[in-house]
Amino acid sequence: MIENLETEIIEFMLNSMPVEISFIDENDKVSYFNKNGDRIFPRPRSVVGKKVHQCHPKKSVNKVIEIIESFKNGKRDVANFWINLNGRLIYIRYFAVRDNNKKYLGTLEVSQDITDIKKIEGEKRLLDWK
């Protein structure tokens, strides 16, 4: 629930997250992406307003369209996959965004470099900044 949270603060929050977020609206147009430092998949500001198939490499466009269509027709709500890119393991997740009545509003694409996360073992229960 959002109460009295300014758009600017929401944008700073999204830009602070260690993930890349893109939102594709119900008409398959890119309407948002966050700017979280060094992006895995750089995006120029000019992609906003373009159809999603114009913003992905040719070899992945058909899969992206298939994912979005499966969200639109209600067959799926999540699609997960991972790739090796320049020696790093990249986890890519797509989520259907729906309103309270299950109406499709768009697709959220979230990408994260999980190379270092995969190395975590055991526990670290206390903060240690040394």
Image (cartoon, rainbow, N blue to C red):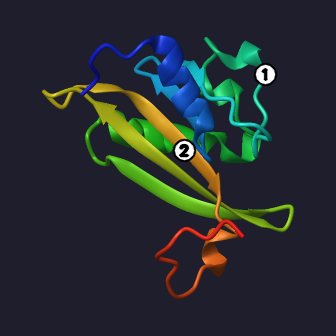
> Which residue is rendered at x = 49% and y = 58% of the image?
80
User: Which sits in the foreground, 123 or 101?
Assistant: 123
* Residue 49 sits in quarter: top right
Tell me the crowding category of disc 1: few under 14, some 14 to 19, or many 20 or more residues within 10 angstroms, Cα based: few
In the image: residue 72, left or right of residue 108: left
- Viewport quadrant of the C terminus: bottom right
Write down the residue under mark 1: 44
Percent from the top left, x then y, of residue 8?
A: 53, 14
Residue found at the far left of this picture: 101
> Measured along the vertical axis of the image, is residue 38 above or below residue 123?
above
Q: Secondary structure at mark 1?
A: loop
Residue found at the far right of this picture: 86
Where residue 96 is drawn, which disc sits there?
Answer: none
Q: Secondary structure at mark 2?
A: strand
Write down the residue under mark 2: 110
Residue found at the far front of this picture: 130
Is residue 28 something that shows in the picture?
no
